[in-house]
């Protein structure tokens, strides 16, 4: 009988959490606490089976807590902490506990059946179980505390009784702030009630809710890294936690909205002093330098004209850089090296690491069949493979040249080249101009930072945003731009990607003649034998360069790795679909391009990074630092919120 | 030119008015022949003048500016219309402008409704005019009948915050204490969303406070009108918490006042909402802060500032008292919590003697609410001698205060209240008797009610004092009062007076004739069951007297009536009649035999036999007991 009673209680609702439920939880937690880096600071998801007193029993995916001690006096109190402390980057953190049973009557059955039963200890006979001999006075006083505690606080106690421990107790409705004596706080609570606990990591306070109603501030000046904690002291007490598994009874998101608005208005109202003119000049300067840095020559000139500012760099210098960058991004690294040596003599000689990087890239592009040294062997139009797909080109991936800014930058190729991943299945996506597509990635990767900048020389009209513009134009330019180039980049080798060309670029002006490429299969060096030979020869030269550098400057593991990776491509019959095939992705041209650009700028005594990016990086880093040192307001001041 | 000269300069404005520019401007404005640019400029200048002091507005009103501007609204030119509306808006929101001026011509409202579609400025100004000029149910009905709800509803989702806000304010005044409007509002939808949902969205915490507060007012009105249930989550989980937040220290003084008043109104009649509010965000403690303003005694040098502070202090205090009154209206635990709040009783006692009528009234209301507790009457009310200031309030106060104060007095005069004695000694009987003569119905009810409470189980002297103070004429006057409440309480008073044998005999010996007359009259008249029951109970009390019995036994008319009610279809009346009979035939008393015989002859015994078979256990028992008296 006892068994049945227990069974019905424990098996009554919800089966143990299944993977989809876990996913649902993850989704919900991400939405609630988007600023939390869960790899660094995981969120509490259940009670910890390790961090509890042994009078505590856990079930239902470690969400249900029941008491299994004697419950005679306060020495029998038992607590359990959640698996992880509350990360400061939550800003506002919230969890709820439902009182399934306050203990006392009826509960003893469950206790005796589930745990070591009374009957089993008696050999031979089966006594009917005795009712527990708990004195009335104790039954009258139910103890149940919900709250927070730091790691290491004694678990043989209720939350709130000790230092760094805080609790709200159901029997008297008092709050316990690191003290054995409580303060009158709220109403009492009992079976059926849902008690919520909200930690505000911005002002370090805490309030509770009862059945969805806020009860007001309970604690102030809370320390960092507290764990959700619950403590029981009466046989039969059962509580269920909700760390986000279910929708909350209290509207926590509304509370978060209030704080988000508060913090954002603080930022908005932040005094910038009475140097208003200076402030504006600084902003203009930042924009201008950004445009110049990436070589948006005409836009920069236009901007300078309107804002009445001057550009530090010479027009021709900007154009030169622009040309070199385009070559790299088009995969024509050999030509880029040549152009650099011509325009900036001595630059590469002084930067052997950069040169090596470029040469490695050149080798990869040879494999790809895009570099001019191998392309010229092709029977097809020598310029036919100039195209750079999707032209994320000059719109830089933020963080790629500053990798610590955006840890996600590196592993999300969608960041600047969303085109590749989102449109990969479309065999006829066309990108008529450089500029229009750069922002199309904004739709595919909300986390990426995007500027849509026009680089076209004709007008700023082409600065249209996003996919709409490229859809409009793609149809009209379809006939003109009938060139389709295989450009092995995709994970799916059978899908042939067709890339549009740019037509108004000076370096491509000769390429107006178009031709069809019907080859469905990507081949090494474009499938040309002579080209392959050239490639192998180039590989040898590269190897020699590496050895030479090694002699002159000592061993360089980076170089070794680069070279190894590049050469590994040859070990596979289908380099595009191999473990190191990633290198062939045009997106990999970007870091090389950025490094070269920076080096050129540095050689001209110009900043190698645009101040705008520096500021952005600083802001992001600052927020991460805030999260680490426990400043909760970082969660409502996301850099992304200000970049759309 | 003139426009730039006056804008932002009150002195220049006054000068211009003194120089007689207003009639000239109005003339130009009304001149059909002048160019619209000129007319628009005129409206702008007039609008600027109206922005000045109240005296400016008065001068403008004296020149019949409203008619001229309303006339201007008929123009086809939108810019000109907007300028006129702007000026009208400025004038109508001034406290010196009578709202009725808007309603003198019926076509004005419909024209304004039509102009609502013209531009976001017409929308903003017209809504603002409506919300300021809608005072009382008459105005609400006029606007409602002109389709205000439909015309304004879609403005709630306007992209302009100002339009949204003014539309919202319109609804808050339209729906206030108006079931018709409230019932309509719940079913109106805009872009597929019902208005209550739109209001709830406006309650979100990141919305401007003004918007949250006004939206909460709309929902409150709708809830009080019965259009939204009190247990609806939009009330319990949204409106109520929002209003509690408005009471927090972080809010502006005005917001705290409005928040508390609105919350008091929302929870006034619903005990569950009172309970929820009482635990939300420490509301009861939070309200105590309302008494701590101004926090520090500000320098008296700045008289203006001081005046401002005092006004706010009054507003805050009265709002807090009102909310405490609502909170403690029904739940004993909440009352206890309120009274345990620091210095609460002292604050109420002080409030009772404040100069501001508003504060005094609210303090009395709060006291009234708390006086509905047996425990508090016996403890804190006694400890703080609350009756003293209360009695003071009752001396020549305006009626509105008198009503609540006398209501409170009713509770303090309850038999178990220790305040009863001192109140009597301080001349309450006289005061209450005079209240029963008031024109004001509520005062009459409270007066007689208090006397009734006073007479309950009172000693002979008090009863005589009451009868003497009231005078028989007044007593009979009250028995023929058109209000059933007054009648009931007067009967209750009679019943309380006529208890314990010596008292009954004494009173009946002096007032017997009149009382019997009144009883007969009421039993014959068209009255509801409760009244008749109460009257029969009085007869039963009389029948319990020793000498008073004879007044019934010798009155065949009354006996016949008792007999009639024994067979009445209503069990309550039957039971009451049976009490009379029981008392008349009770054995051990002198002359019981004769009375039994007389009643048997009247056929009462037969009826008793019949009743002893009744399915109603009370009737059955009572009849059997009565029959036993015959057997003995």
Image: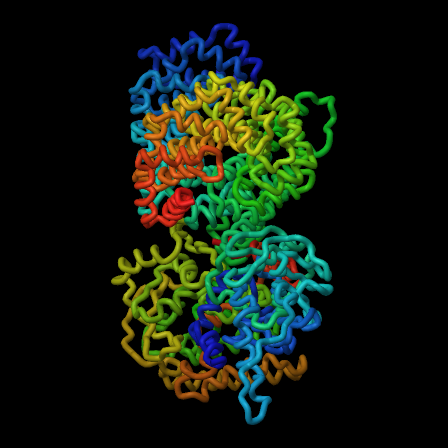
In the displayed structure, does residue B257 sit left or right of residue A376? right
Residue A317 percent across, percent down from the top left:
54, 57
Q: Could you tell me residue B483's position as x and y percent?
A: 40, 25
Q: What is the x, y in percent for residue A29?
A: 50, 65
Q: Position of residue A433 (x, y in %)?
A: 37, 59
Instruction: Give the vertical position of B370 relative to B127 (above or below).
Output: below
* A480 displayed left or right of B374: left
Residue most toward the top?
Answer: B19
From what the image shows, is residue A127 above or below residue B77?
A: below
Q: Nearer the viewer, residue B297 or A8?
A: A8
What is the residue that sits farthest to the left in this orientation? Answer: A479
Q: How many marks?
A: 0
Instruction: For residue B34, say whether it is visible.
Output: yes
When the figure is inspected, residue A550 is found, relative to residue A381, above or below; the finding is below
- Residue A376 shows in this picture: no
| B330 and A91: which is toward the camera | B330
Looking at the rendering, which quadrant does residue B405 occupy? top right
- In the image, residue B123 sits, relative to residue B52, either above or below, namely below
Q: In the image shown, does A479 or B140 lie closer to the viewer?
A: B140
Q: Residue at x 27, y 59 (%)?
A: A475
Task: Please say which color scheme the image uses.
Answer: rainbow
Q: Residue at x 73, y 64 (%)?
A: A163
**Residue A553 lies in what quarter of the image?**
bottom right
Residue at 71% of width from left, 64% of height from top?
Answer: A161
């Amino acid at each position: 009988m006892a068994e049945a009673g227990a069974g019905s209680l424990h098996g009554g609702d919800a089966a143990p959490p299944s993977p989809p439920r876990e996913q649902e939880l993850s989704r919900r937690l991400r939405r609630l606490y988007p600023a939390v880096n869960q790899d660094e600071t995981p969120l509490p998801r259940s009670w910890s089976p390790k961090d509890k007193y042994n009078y505590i029993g856990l079930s239902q995916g470690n969400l249900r807590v029941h008491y299994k001690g004697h419950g005679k006096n306060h020495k029998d109190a038992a607590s359990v902490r959640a698996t992880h402390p509350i990360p400061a980057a939550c800003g506002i953190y919230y969890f709820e506990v439902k009182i399934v049973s306050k203990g006392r009557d009826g509960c003893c059955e469950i206790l005796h059946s589930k745990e070591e039963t009374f009957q089993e200890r008696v050999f031979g006979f089966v006594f009917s179980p005795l009712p527990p001999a708990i004195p009335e006075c104790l039954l009258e006083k139910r103890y149940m505390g919900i709250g927070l505690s730091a790691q290491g606080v004694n678990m043989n106690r209720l939350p709130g009784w000790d230092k760094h421990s805080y609790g709200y107790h159901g029997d008297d409705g008092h709050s316990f702030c690191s003290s054995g004596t409580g303060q009158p706080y709220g109403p009492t609570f009992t079976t059926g009630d849902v008690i919520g606990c909200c930690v505000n990591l911005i002002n370090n306070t805490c309030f509770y809710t009862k059945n969805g109603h806020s009860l007001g501030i309970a604690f102030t000046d809370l320390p960092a890294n507290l764990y959700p904690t619950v403590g029981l002291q009466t046989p039969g007490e059962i509580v269920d936690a909700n760390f986000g598994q279910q929708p909350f009874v209290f509207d926590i998101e509304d509370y978060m909205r209030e704080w988000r608005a508060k913090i954002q208005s603080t930022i908005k109202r932040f005094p910038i002093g009475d140097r208003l003119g200076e402030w504006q000049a600084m902003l203009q300067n930042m924009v201008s330098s950004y445009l110049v840095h990436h070589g948006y020559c005409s836009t920069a000139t236009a901007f300078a004209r309107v804002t009445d500012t001057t550009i530090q760099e010479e027009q021709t210098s900007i154009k030169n850089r622009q040309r070199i960058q385009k070559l790299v991004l088009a995969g024509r690294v050999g030509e880029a090296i040549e152009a650099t040596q011509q325009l900036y003599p001595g630059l590469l000689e002084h930067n052997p690491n950069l040169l090596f990087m470029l040469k490695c890239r050149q080798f990869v592009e040879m494999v790809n069949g895009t570099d001019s040294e191998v392309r010229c062997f092709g029977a097809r139009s020598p310029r036919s493979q100039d195209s750079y797909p999707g032209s994320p080109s000059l719109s830089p991936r933020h963080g790629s040249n500053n990798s610590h800014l955006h840890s996600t930058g590196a592993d999300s190729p969608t960041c600047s080249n969303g085109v590749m991943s989102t449109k990969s299945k479309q065999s006829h996506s066309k990108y008529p101009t450089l500029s229009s597509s750069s922002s199309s990635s904004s739709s595919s990767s909300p986390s990426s930072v995007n500027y849509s900048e026009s680089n076209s020389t004709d007008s700023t009209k082409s600065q249209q945003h996003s996919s709409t513009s490229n859809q409009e134009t793609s149809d009209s330019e379809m006939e003109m731009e009938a060139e389709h180039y295989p450009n092995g980049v995709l994970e799916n080798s059978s899908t042939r990607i067709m890339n549009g060309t740019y037509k108004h670029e000076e370096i491509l002006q000769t390429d107006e003649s178009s031709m069809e490429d019907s080859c469905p299969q990507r081949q090494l060096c474009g499938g040309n034998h002579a080209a392959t030979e050239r490639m192998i020869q180039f590989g040898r030269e590269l190897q020699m360069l590496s050895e030479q550098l090694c002699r002159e400057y000592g061993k360089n593991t980076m170089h070794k790795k680069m070279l190894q990776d590049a050469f590994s491509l040859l070990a596979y019959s289908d380099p595009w679909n191999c473990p190191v095939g990633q290198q062939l992705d045009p997106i990999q041209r970007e870091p090389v391009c950025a490094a070269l650009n920076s080096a050129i700028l540095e050689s001209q005594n110009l900043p190698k990074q645009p101040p705008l990016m520096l500021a952005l990086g600083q802001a992001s880093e600052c927020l991460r630092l805030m999260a680490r040192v426990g400043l909760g307001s970082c969660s409502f001041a996301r850099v992304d919120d200000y970049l759309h | 030119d003139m426009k730039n000269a006056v804008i932002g300069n009150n002195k220049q404005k006054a000068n211009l008015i003194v120089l007689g520019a207003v009639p000239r401007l109005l003339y130009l404005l009304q001149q059909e022949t002048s160019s619209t640019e000129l007319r628009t400029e005129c409206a702008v200048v007039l609008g600027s003048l109206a922005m000045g002091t109240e005296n400016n507005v008065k001068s403008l009103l004296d020149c019949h500016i409203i008619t001229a501007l309303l006339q201007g609204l008929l123009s086809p030119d939108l810019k000109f219309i907007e300028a006129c509306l702007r000026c009208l808006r400025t004038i109508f929101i001034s406290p010196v402008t009578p709202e009725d001026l808007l309603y003198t011509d019926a076509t004005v409202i419909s024209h304004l409704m039509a102009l609502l579609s013209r531009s976001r400025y017409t929308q903003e100004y017209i809504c603002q005019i409506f919300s300021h000029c809608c005072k009382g149910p008459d105005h609400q009905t006029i606007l409602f009948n002109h389709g205000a709800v439909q015309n304004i509803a879609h403005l709630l989702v306007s992209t302009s915050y100002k339009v949204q806000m003014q539309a919202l304010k319109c609804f808050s005044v339209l729906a206030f204490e108006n079931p018709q409007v409230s019932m309509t509002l719940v079913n109106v939808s805009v872009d597929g969303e019902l208005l209550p949902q739109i209001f709830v969205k406006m309650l979100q915490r990141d919305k401007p406070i003004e918007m949250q507060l006004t939206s909460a007012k709309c929902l409150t009105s709708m809830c009080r009108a019965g259009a939204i249930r009190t247990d609806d989550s939009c009330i319990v989980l949204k409106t109520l918490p929002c209003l509690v937040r408005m009471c927090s220290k972080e809010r502006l003084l005005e917001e705290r006042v409005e928040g508390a008043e609105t919350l008091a109104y929302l929870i006034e009649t619903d005990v569950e909402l009172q309970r929820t509010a009482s635990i939300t965000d420490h509301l009861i403690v939070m309200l105590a802060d309302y008494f701590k303003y101004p926090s520090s005694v500000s320098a008296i040098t700045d008289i203006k500032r001081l005046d401002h502070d005092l006004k706010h202090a009054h507003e805050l205090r009265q709002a807090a008292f009102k909310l405490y009154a609502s909170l403690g209206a029904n739940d004993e635990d909440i009352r206890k919590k309120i009274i345990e709040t620091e210095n609460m009783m002292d604050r109420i006692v002080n409030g009772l003697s404040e100069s501001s009528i508003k504060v005094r009234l609210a303090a009395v209301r709060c006291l009234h609410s708390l006086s509905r507790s047996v425990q508090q009457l016996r403890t804190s009310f006694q400890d703080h001698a609350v009756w003293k200031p209360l009695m003071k309030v009752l001396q020549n106060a305006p009626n509105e205060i008198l009503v609540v104060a006398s209501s409170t007095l009713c509770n303090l005069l309850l038999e178990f209240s220790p305040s009863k004695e001192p109140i009597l000694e301080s001349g309450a009987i006289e005061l209450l008797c005079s209240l029963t003569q008031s024109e004001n119905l509520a005062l009459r009810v409270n007066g007689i009610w208090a006397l009734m409470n006073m007479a309950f189980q009172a000693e002979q002297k008090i009863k005589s004092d009451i009868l003497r103070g009231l005078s028989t004429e007044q007593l009979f006057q009250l028995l023929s009062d058109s209000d059933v409440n007054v009648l009931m309480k007067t009967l209750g008073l009679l019943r309380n007076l006529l208890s314990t044998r010596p008292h009954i005999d004494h009173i009946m010996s002096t007032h017997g004739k009149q009382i019997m007359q009144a009883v007969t009259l009421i039993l014959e008249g068209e009255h509801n069951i409760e009244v008749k029951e109460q009257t029969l109970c009085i007869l039963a009390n009389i029948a319990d007297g020793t000498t008073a019995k004879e007044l019934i036994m010798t009155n065949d008319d009354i006996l016949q009536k008792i007999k009639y009610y024994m067979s009445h279809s209503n069990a309550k009346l039957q039971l009451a009649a049976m009490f009379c009979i029981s008392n008349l035939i009770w054995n051990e008393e002198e002359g019981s035999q004769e009375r039994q015989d007389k009643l048997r002859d009247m056929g009462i015994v037969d009826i008793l036999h019949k009743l002893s078979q009744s399915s109603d256990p009370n009737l059955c028992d009572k009849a059997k007991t009565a029959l036993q008296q015959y057997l003995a």
